[in-house]
Image (cartoon, helix red, strand yellow):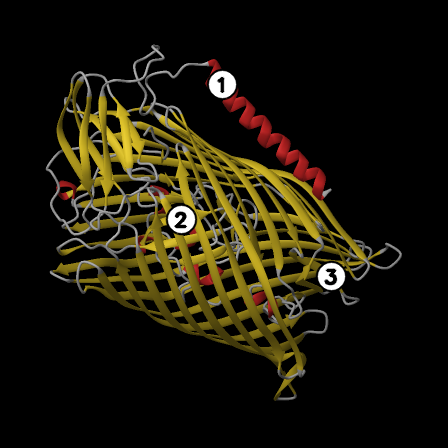
Amino acid sequence: MKYTLLNTFAFITLLLLFQVGSHLQAQPPKGGGNGSGSRGSGQTPTTGVNGMILDAQNNPIPYASVAIYSAKDSTLKKGAATNINGQFKIALRPGKYYASISMLAHQDKIIPDLKVQDAFIPLGKIVLEADEVALEAIDIVGEKSTMQLKLDKRVFNVGKDLASKGGNVTELLDNVPSVNVDIDGNVSLRGSENVRILIDGKPSGLVGISSTDALRQLQGSMVQSVEVITNPSARYDAEGEVGIINIVLKKERKKGLNGSFEATLGHPTNYGLSFNLNYRRKNVNLFTNYGMSYRANPGCGTQYQEFYDDNGNLFSSHNIERDHVRGGLSNTIQFGADIFLNKSNTLTVSGMYKPSKNPNEANILYEDFDSEGNLYNVTNRQDRETETGHNLEGALSYLKNFKRKGHKWTFDAKYILGDDTELVDYEEHSSFNDSTIYQRSSNTEDERNLLLQTDYVHPFGKDGKFEMGLKTTLRTISNKYTVEEEIDGQWQILGDFNDELAYTEDIYAAYIMAGNKSGKFSYQGGVRAEYSDISTELLESNTTNPRDYLDWFPSIHLAYELPQQNTIQVSYSRRISRPRFWFLLPFFTFSDSRNIFSGNPDLNPEYTNSIELGYLKNFEKGTLLSSVYYRYRTGVIERIRLVNELGETRMFPINMANQNAYGIEFNFSYNLMDWWRLNTNLDFYRAITDGEYNDITLHSDTYTWSGRLSSKFKLPKDIDLQTSFNYRAPRVTTQGKRYAAGSWDMGISKDLLKGNATLTLSAKDILNTRRRRGITETAELFSESEFQWRSRQIVMTFNYRLNQKKKRGGRGGYGGGGDY
């Protein structure tokens, strides 16, 4: 099967390349596209603009956005992105224009008074300064690109998504193309939850021990952009089967005092305050971010279960109804300083602290039926939980720029402290014998994490670049879980739910890579070595599972620039997915005592080989990015559910044998009108999974897809309206099926106070359909469930910008490609 799928992928790749080549040979270049020449002539364009974009250290800036507007009415005429050397060339008809140049972490720049006559206008070297405050005072109508395409990643600017205003980071990620967040808050990329989540390019206490809960507590207003890296190069950690999601927090370097303030009010209970401030003077840049939120999220769920004996006869069944309210108060503050020692040396120090306190409540109703369907028992179970957490981290970064452009050395150090304590009281009353059970549980998690990293970049030749680096991550986690029951007035420990886990994870990595360009062909290759020394110890049961292994992770990226700013890319990488910490815990939760979720301390890592082919097509008013991908995984980690003789189920992860997954993805953006922009993301894939556990054969073969359609309208009087639809098709699992899920969001915003403020009203999950539904079916169990983490909500957000007027410029959609 493995080799058949590889041959199939190779055939699809060759067919796509053949079709692209045939199309280019059969049709002459047409005008009207970004960077094209005269319409219908098929001749080389002779009029337009060209130039080169540099940063403050005179390093070329690849993939910067260059937008050309009419000087008469500010309508968008053409757009392009710089190539790997920071160069651009845009064909234009004779006329009067101005240019808007933008790039993340750099100040936008306006080039006015461009008079195109009978030749290309050389704009020369254009420097984007990170330190300048004032821009040319030109009223621009338009919008910054939603996505920027780079050689090995896609960058999504999330600030323009009205549906995410006032939300947390999980809600923000759910609106990023290729990314899905399920009802439980689990983040997946292209259908897989084995994705590495970083903050500002590094592991962070903001992600926490459990990224699901931690990301829910992080305000979305603190995020500037999200980087999606589906096939990471050797410079990135090898962790993550499908790649990396890097969340970039806001930080400015403009001179003087600037920033923004945001207040949120929503229903159900959703209150929030946040700000980000920056103060730059001479050689020091001070920055801070703060976010506070208080939430009470109501949710509910139902479950019907049937239990069968060894002969396939039904012996009992029950209904379960659950209502809960989860949330609480959380705060996050980040602060730091950039110290510019001189033009070549920069030192950055920063710290972050996140305290939280969450009172959570849940009520569960059980109705038990015998084999004839007769009700014989009703049980009510209540739990009252208090969860407190503290995360503290400090970071130090040093940047050394040498005389040659792009020649630099960096050093980073980070230390993270985290603790989380969950104390729960349970009360369970049964009508069968009119009895009441009192229980309590304690779950404490403590984490220590030290990260040391250094990277060196040395350019060679005209376009070549050599890179190497070292990284060490030392991580220790302690988890103690205990459940007690009151018996005859005394609290007694339940032996099956009492243990302490000591987990150590030391990873030592080194990488080397190089890249160059020959004509329109760019290539980059490298290899990363990671030595893992991991130990899992259960102190109460006195069992230890030490493991150490050395792995090699090669990667290669190839790109070819086609005419009319179209680009084709091919990449390969090998990845590893080590078991998540909470997958190793002996116990998860005792909230539903009949359906236990637990971990597996004996889990091994899974490995992935990934191949991807991408094609970027630019139109005059839009962009289409299509990708074909294939992944072969071994040791796949997947949760299964087993049932005991008492009719209680236990869900835990195991290592399956292997999985083959392949699919095709489309990201499409198009300006239907000057005031109407459409963005669409579609992902179609097939996954075949095989495995075995205790002589039970596990197999699934699923065809499924997911998509998001977003439509944004610019209305008169500085009003924006956006509506979006999310959908995940049904999919087959090794023990059942997940049903389809979808949601509809809408948002409207109005600029106020001469562009210094924005008021946004958004509605999320308007039809209240965002629910997890599915069935589990084995020889002993049939279970059908529906769960909703949070009901529909309405949120109002007010944002005020201090010395940061809202910029309305640039082309909406996906940037990339370019004629050079």
Pointer 2 and pointer 1: residues touching (CB < 8 Å)? Answer: no
The disc, 2 or 1, on the residue closer to the chain's N-terminal end is 1
Q: Which residue occupies the foreground of this view, 482 or 114?
A: 114
Tell me the mark number nearer the camera, choosing from 3 and 2: 2
- Residue 715 found in image quarter: top left
**Where is mark 2, residue-wise?**
227
Question: Which numbered dot is residue 668?
Answer: none
Within-10-Å neighbours for mark 3: few <14, some 14–19, many 20+: some
Q: In which quarter of the image is the C terminus?
A: top left
Chain-order first, disc 3 or disc 2: 2
For label 3, the SS is strand
Q: Distance between the residues labelled 2 and 1?
A: 32 Å
Say which of 383 and 120 sits in front: 120
Residue at image location 28% in from the left, 43% down from the top: 61
Q: In this view, does 803 lie to the left or right of 738?
A: left
Circle 1 packing at 10 Å, graded few (<14), some (14-19), many (20+), is: few
Element on which disc 1 rests: helix
- Whether the residues at callouts 3 and 2 have beta carbons within 8 Å, the answer is no
Question: Which residue position holds label 3?
Answer: 642
Residue 710 drawn at (x, y percent): 40, 35
What's under tag 1, amino acid-wise?
His
- Rounded to the nearest angstrom, the CA distance separating label 3 from label 1 is 54 Å
